Amino acid sequence: MRIAIIGAGIIGAAVADALAVRGAEVFMYDMRAPGKGASQASAGVLCPYIEATSGSPLLALGARSLSMWDDWVAAVLARSSRSFHYARTGTLEVAFGDAGGSHLQQSAAWLAAEGVAHEWLDRAALKDFEPQASALATSGLYIAGHAHVDVPALVAALMSAARQHGATCETPTEIIHIEQKSDVVHVRVGDPASSRPLEVDHVVIAAGSWSRRVRVAGAPVFPVRPVRGQLLHLAWTDAALPRRSVWGPRCYTVPWPDGTVLVGATVEDVGFDERSTVDGVRGLMDAVSELLPAAARASLRSVRVGLRPATADQLPLLGPLKDHPRITLAAGHYRNGILLAPYTADVVTRMILDKERDPLLALTRPDRTSLSNIPPG
Ligand code: GLY
């Protein structure tokens, strides 16, 4: 089967790898190099029990995908010539003051009801557990099942595995036009009048916020909008690295084996503006210095910026387009594209190659009515 994938970020790369390894002929397109869109805004923390709320549809998707990560990582590492760092070392959320403490206690009660392993830490226990956390922090909540992954290296490993199985990737590409003609789909890159179409059996649109710029004949513009995230990459200098991903009220951090720490992330509704700003950087610097005081002595290595693809209800658009069954949308993963990558790759592959439909996809139908109020832009 011939399949075109529009977008070579984490979702496009994961889908390409999964389809190519099953024998599909995969053609990828992106307007820039792989992994340079939303993936840039991610520090790679896989933490559905922080990102989602109790009983939410996002939690069902996130928990399911988190359970797939260990096996998925082993399989990708086995078939790729590239390696990447992945650690299931948990997350530590810390609170300041009474209000923060009671919020963490509510989270602990919810996790207990869900049967999720966790540990609530009082001030003294927190000091032993994470010596780098601020002495002003009053309590902590450790969730051992959370993990983190080096996103750029993961995207490179997925692209390498997909290419080893014959996938091609054309970059940079401009506007893409797609048209389903009964049981074949035409893909045209650039000027639709002058380019010859690629004929494929199926198209997967996984271009994050840029999915709204993909033109599908007879379909409305996809309701995805960009939300900017700025991240700091710090080189830790004269203190021990934090032992795991630490979350505070205004930022989160991820330690890396090379002695650096990623600090995330701003959440800014500024359209397709991928610049870093003084305000964004200053806010993150203040927040991380409050959370991990040694950060004030770290050096600033770089600022990363990415655009998360948001939807009105913060759930992805995942499934075939209404009236265009050979065109599948896999976009709008907002803050959880990395977490949801193995689930997305698996359900898209089974949907296209095996005609199987995961029941959770009822939550992510691209034409659900809750999306009608997305602002244009
Ligand atoms: N996944 C966290 C963020 O998007 O900032």
Image (cartoon, rainbow, N blue to C red):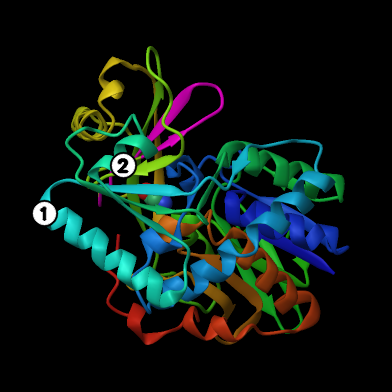
Q: Position of residue 60 (x, y in %)?
A: 48, 75
Residue identifier under label 1: 98
For ligand 1, tell me if the residue under mark 2 lies within 8 Å: no
Question: What kind of element bears circle 2?
Answer: helix
Residue 123 sits in which quadrant?
A: top left
Mark 1 / mark 2, whichever is N-terminal: 1
Q: Position of residue 16 (x, y in %)?
A: 72, 56
> In the rendered structure, which segment of residues is drawn in magenta?
253-269
Quadrant holding the N terminus: bottom right
Q: Judge whether residue 239 is colored magenta.
A: no
Q: Which residue is drawn at 44% across and 71% down?
A: 59
Tell me the crowding category of disc 1: few under 14, some 14 to 19, or many 20 or more residues within 10 angstroms, Cα based.
Answer: few
Residue identifier under label 2: 126
For ligand 1, tell me if the residue under mark 1 lies within 8 Å: no
Quadrant holding the C terminus: bottom left
Question: What kind of element bears circle 1?
Answer: helix
Image: 338 above or below 326: above
Tell me the crowding category of disc 2: few under 14, some 14 to 19, or many 20 or more residues within 10 angstroms, Cα based.
Answer: many
Q: Where is residue 221 in the image (x, y as percent from the top left)?
A: 43, 70
Q: Nearer the viewer, residue 113 or 348?
A: 113
Residue lying furthest left: 98
Q: Position of residue 339 (x, y in %)?
A: 53, 57
Q: In the visual, does 146 lie left or right of 313?
A: right
Q: Does residue 191 show up?
A: no
Q: Does residue 261 show up?
A: yes
Residue 105 sits in which quadrant?
A: bottom left
Q: Which of 1 and 364 is in front in this view?
A: 364
